[in-house]
């Protein structure tokens, strides 16, 4: 027997003392097995601890990754300070970027609160901008109320575009992930048809509409380049926070989404509340498209909606579908986007690396959700 053999030699009696022989026996192998237990209650202190730990881990990993790519931590800190806090103009740029991101996050969070996975935000933005542009291009209504009519039309466009998937989900049980996602492509091709066809700018012949008149644009706030897009987003966030946190509708919606069978048993109109939340999500999505067209671009372009689907889902997820959380995450996302653009320009950081940093934050926050939901124990097993 070789010296490397892990087996031991033990005697086995055969009835006579002199007739013993040695046979190998194995040592018992002990290993630790993880056991998951669902947490019954999570305190706010625990929640803040895990969120803070996840953000700290994501920050450390991102700083290390950027340092490996040639961006020193001191340069990164200076760049963040320059982008956000160096001047009122820098802060204004962050707030201008925050407003549409906030509206996109709110639109997604409303649907997620009702267990409707709305992946059609971009399509609802496109239809909202199209409906608003119809009012502007064909001069519907008096000049003094044109902007309000455009906003109402935009909300109607978003609701129309989400009503189909809502009906298919409620009546036929068809997954809204598929229907809302596919309708994004339908809306995009409709947009291209209009911009390369009847709505092409008659002056430049570029694929965008002609510029809106002054009374068809969201007015400036009088501070830097900020328009009423930011107050509009803040008003929406405050209104939704009150509805979801303090109103009877918000309480019943939470009850319906958490336990629909029990809600139906006690007489809650689950289907009506769900459809109402879905239509509200579409309305805010359409209003997001209107706010960009009338408050940022001052016309409808062919790529004004790009990237807002991913950003809206990310902001709603990180903000836990709560309006106040969405506000914080939207501001953080705006800073991250602007810092990423600055790093690409001044440090030649590739855009893929910036997206990787965003993915690191998503993974770390998702991991914190796991530890908030489960408690891990270790059990010895042979």
Image (spheres, rainbow, N blue to C red):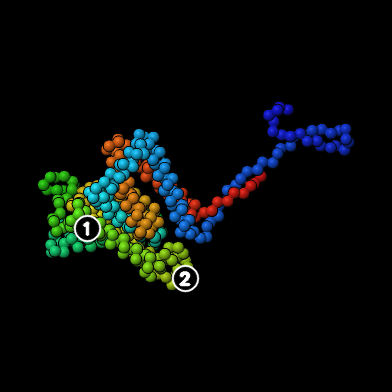
- Left or right: residue 8 compared with residue 363: right
Q: Residue furthest top?
A: 2
Q: What residue lies at 43% left-to-right and 66% top-to-bottom?
A: 255
Q: Nearer the viewer, mark 2 or mark 1?
A: 1
Residue 218 screen position, x and y as percent:
19, 57
Q: Is residue 192 visible?
A: no
Find residue 228 and name its label.
1
Q: CA distance from mark 2 to mark 1?
A: 44 Å
Count of numbered labels shown in the rendering: 2
For the point 22% across and 49% down, the residue is 89
Circles 2 and 1 in contact, beta carbons < 8 Å = no
In which image quadrant can residue 140 be found? bottom left
User: Measured from the top left, where is residue 299 in percent x and y?
Assistant: 18, 51
Q: Secondary structure at mark 2?
A: helix
| Residue 51 located left or right of residue 296 | right
Q: Residues within 10 Å of mark 1 (few under 14, many from 20)?
A: some
166 or 226: nearer the viewer: 226
Residue 265 is tagged as 2
Q: Is residue 358 left or right of residue 43?
A: left
For the C terminus, the quadrant is top right
Extreme-left residue of the structure: 203
Q: What residue is drawn where x is 41% and y is 48%?
A: 55
Q: On residue 263, which mark appears?
A: none
Q: Which of the 4 image quarters holds residue 321?
A: bottom left
**Residue appearing at x 53%, y 56% in the figure:** 38
């Amino acid at each position: 027997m070789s010296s490397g053999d892990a087996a031991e030699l033990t005697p086995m009696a055969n009835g006579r003392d002199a007739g013993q022989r040695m046979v190998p026996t194995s040592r018992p192998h002990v290993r630790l097995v993880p056991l998951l237990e669902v947490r019954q209650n999570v305190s706010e202190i625990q929640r803040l601890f895990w969120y803070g730990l996840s953000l700290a881990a994501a920050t450390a990993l991102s700083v290390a990754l950027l340092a490996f790519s040639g961006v020193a931590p001191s340069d990164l800190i200076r760049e963040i300070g320059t982008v956000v806090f160096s001047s009122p103009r820098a802060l204004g740029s962050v707030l201008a970027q925050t407003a549409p991101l906030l509206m996109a996050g709110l639109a997604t969070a409303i649907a997620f609160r009702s267990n409707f996975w709305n992946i059609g935000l971009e399509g609802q933005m496109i239809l909202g901008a199209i409906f608003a542009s119809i009012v502007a291009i064909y001069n519907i209504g008096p000049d003094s109320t044109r902007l309000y009519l455009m906003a109402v039309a935009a909300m109607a466009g978003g609701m129309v575009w989400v009503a189909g998937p809502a009906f298919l989900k409620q009546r036929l049980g068809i997954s809204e992930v598929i229907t809302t996602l596919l309708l994004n492509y339908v809306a995009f091709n409709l947009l291209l048809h209009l911009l390369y066809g009847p709505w092409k700018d008659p002056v430049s012949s570029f694929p965008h509409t002609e510029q809106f008149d002054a009374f068809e644009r969201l007015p400036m706030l009088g501070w830097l380049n900020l328009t009423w897009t930011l107050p509009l987003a803040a008003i929406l966030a405050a209104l939704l926070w009150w509805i979801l946190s303090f109103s009877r509708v918000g309480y019943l919606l939470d009850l319906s989404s958490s336990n629909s069978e029990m809600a139906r048993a006690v007489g809650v109109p689950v289907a009506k509340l769900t459809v109402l939340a879905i239509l509200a999500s579409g309305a805010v999505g359409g209003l997001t498209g209107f706010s960009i067209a009338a408050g940022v671009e001052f016309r409808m372009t062919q790529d004004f909606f790009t990237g807002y689907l991913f950003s809206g889902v990310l902001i709603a997820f990180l903000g836990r579908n709560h309006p106040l959380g969405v506000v914080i995450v939207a501001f953080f996302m705006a800073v991250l986007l602007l810092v990423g653009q600055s790093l690409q320009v001044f440090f030649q950081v590739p855009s893929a690396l910036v997206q990787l940093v965003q993915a690191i934050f998503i993974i770390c926050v998702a991991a914190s959700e796991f530890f908030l939901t489960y408690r891990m124990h270790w059990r010895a097993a042979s």
